[in-house]
Image (tube, rainbow, N blue to C red):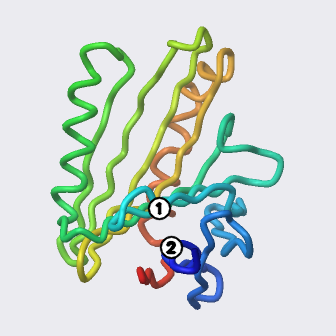
């Protein structure tokens, strides 16, 4: 039991210090702040020995129906930044056959070894139209990769609004994510 509580991703952005997040989100680390928006830990998972996932949303939003979400994934399985981003790109390429909105671009920083994947997708399988834009910043770790990402969604009428506004804020958000000071990630 104690092992499950301790085995999580260590994260705190503002102070740069490290705090262990419990799987039930008790004593939630954070907040993460991006473009003046504060994101609080709302959900965390440790589905395998080498995979950790945490999702953060602004006050008043939920992970089930968010407008903005900040995410942290850690893969401590020896995977490279290029392979982690490539796996996501492969999935997006497959999705293009059934999702006409899918679009993506990769931005590589050869100096840091980081990659940002900028992508757009949609879904209407629930009877509700959802359009989602994401930017994932893949950062190399000693034995794997950390992904720090921002996601924005529009639902039904809001999906059209998101698409219309995308050109105005997309690059600014990508740049903010690219220069964001990241916390130390520790997996125990």
Left or right: 42 in relation to 53 = right
Given residues 175 and 45, the one toward you in this image is 45
Q: Residue at x 73, y 44 (%)?
A: 62
Q: Residues within 10 Å of mark 2 (few under 14, many from 20)?
A: many
Q: Residue at x 69, y 56 (%)?
A: 42
Circle 2 residue: 8
Q: Secondary structure at mark 2?
A: loop
Quarter-wise, where is residue 6 in the image?
bottom right
Mark 2 in CB contact with mark 1 (< 8 angstroms): yes
Left or right: 164 in relation to 92 = right
Q: Secondary structure at mark 1?
A: strand
157 w.r.t. 79: above or below:
above
Circle 1 residue: 46
Marks 2 and 1, the one that precedes in the sequence: 2
Residue 57: % across, % down: 68, 53
Q: Residue furthest right?
A: 60
Q: Residue furthest top?
A: 127
Q: CA distance from mark 2 to mark 1?
A: 7 Å
Residue 108: % across, % down: 22, 61
The answer to whether residue 181 is seen in the rendering is no
């Amino acid at each position: 039991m104690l092992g499950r509580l301790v085995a999580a991703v260590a994260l705190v952005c503002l102070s740069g210090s490290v705090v262990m997040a419990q799987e039930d989100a008790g004593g939630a680390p954070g907040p993460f702040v991006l473009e003046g928006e504060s994101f609080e830990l709302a959900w965390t998972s440790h589905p395998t020995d080498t995979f950790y996932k945490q999702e953060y949303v602004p006050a008043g939003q939920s992970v089930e129906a968010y407008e903005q979400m900040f995410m942290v994934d850690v893969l401590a399985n020896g995977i490279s930044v290029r392979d982690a981003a490539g796996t996501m790109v492969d999935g997006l390429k497959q999705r293009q056959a059934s999702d006409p909105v899918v679009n993506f671009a990769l931005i590589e920083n050869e100096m840091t070894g980081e990659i940002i994947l900028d992508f757009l997708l949609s879904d209407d399988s629930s009877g509700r139209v959802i359009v989602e834009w994401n930017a994932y910043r893949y950062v190399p770790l000693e034995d794997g990769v950390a992904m720090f990402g921002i996601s924005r969604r529009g639902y039904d009428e809001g999906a059209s609004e998101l698409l219309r506004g995308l050109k105005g804020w997309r690059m600014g958000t990508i740049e903010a994510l690219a220069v964001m000071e990241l916390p130390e990630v520790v997996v125990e």
